[in-house]
Image: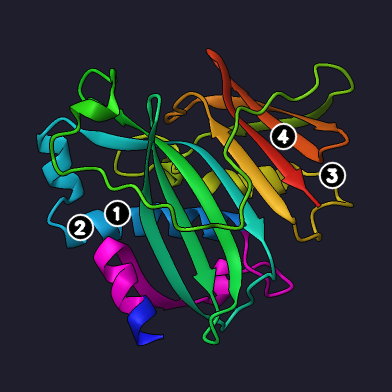
Amino acid sequence: MQDFKQRSMENGYFRQEELTFWDCDREQRVRTAALLSKMAAFAGYDYDARGLTHEVLWANREVFLLSRAALRIHDCPRAGDVLDITTWEAGAKAAHMRRNYEMADREGRVLVSARTDWILVDPETRRILRPSSFTAKPLMCSDRPLDCPETRKLLPPREGREDLGARTVRWSDLDGNGHLFSGNYGDIVWDALPEDLQPRVPREFHINYSREAVLGDTLRLEGCRSREGYFVEGLGPHGPCFTALCVF
């Protein structure tokens, strides 16, 4: 186990965290929003440990925005569980810089695995930059196997949609980049799901972040059942803001 942790620290970032009540739902099972939040946090921890804090990257006019995520829940973690969380870079594909994660119990069983795609953005102009233009450090690429579906563009059916209401972006939703925090989308999705699906634990969760949502934006939420699972899409003032797929 020590050798595994040593390699994880060399090639990425590793540390333990205990799941709190706040991380979990009424059944004391981890919320999807908490998993998304930990993924965002651990990407930051990895770069912080290398001296590349948010402030340093912002000064270099190079910040990361999450574009896509895919999670597989092998065995749902619960309140009080201590997780060994590991993250590592997985190279680049087109405009996306890729990062993977595993969350394991103290016996080494992987409970959650995830893949993410990030885009590099100039925070002043919001212009998307190519991965090759990232100057802060060389981008690492690992062939470490991961039991998780690939990230992909989600295309919900246009027919059979149902109105799930609206959600206005509030002050407490915002992160340090001034937009709706990526982790909060998980709660927005779960609050909008039909009542028969809300208590269920997803086998997989996919999300595309298409446009930034900022303070005061109102997202019109639409849902759709399909053979793949249940889609939730948030439509903002300028088109889709996010698309999520819950696979049960």
Q: What separation in Å lies between label 2 and label 1 (alpha carbons)?
A: 6 Å
Q: Nearer the viewer, mark 3 or mark 1?
A: 1
The x and y percentages for residue 59 are: 10, 36
The earlier-in-sequence mark between 3 and 2 is 2
Residue pushed farthest top? 238
Residue 151 among magenta residues: no
- Residue for badge 1: 44
- Residue for badge 3: 194
What secondary structure is found at the residue carrying circle 2? helix
Residue 29 among magenta residues: yes
Magenta-drawn segment: 5-31
Q: What separation in Å lies between label 4 and label 2 (alpha carbons)?
A: 33 Å
- The amino acid sitting under disc 1 is Gly
Please give the name of the residue rendered at 68% of the width and 29% of the height, measured from the top-left corner: 233
What is the number of callouts on the image? 4
Residues at marks 2 and 1 touching, judged by CB atoms closer than 8 Å: yes
- The amino acid sitting under disc 4 is Val
* Image position of 155 with respect to 113: above or below: above
What secondary structure is found at the residue carrying circle 3? loop
- Residue for badge 4: 232
Callout 3: few (<14), some (14-19), or many (20+) C-alpha neighbours within 10 Å?
few
Please give the name of the residue rendered at 87% of the width and 17% of the height, measured from the top-left corner: 159
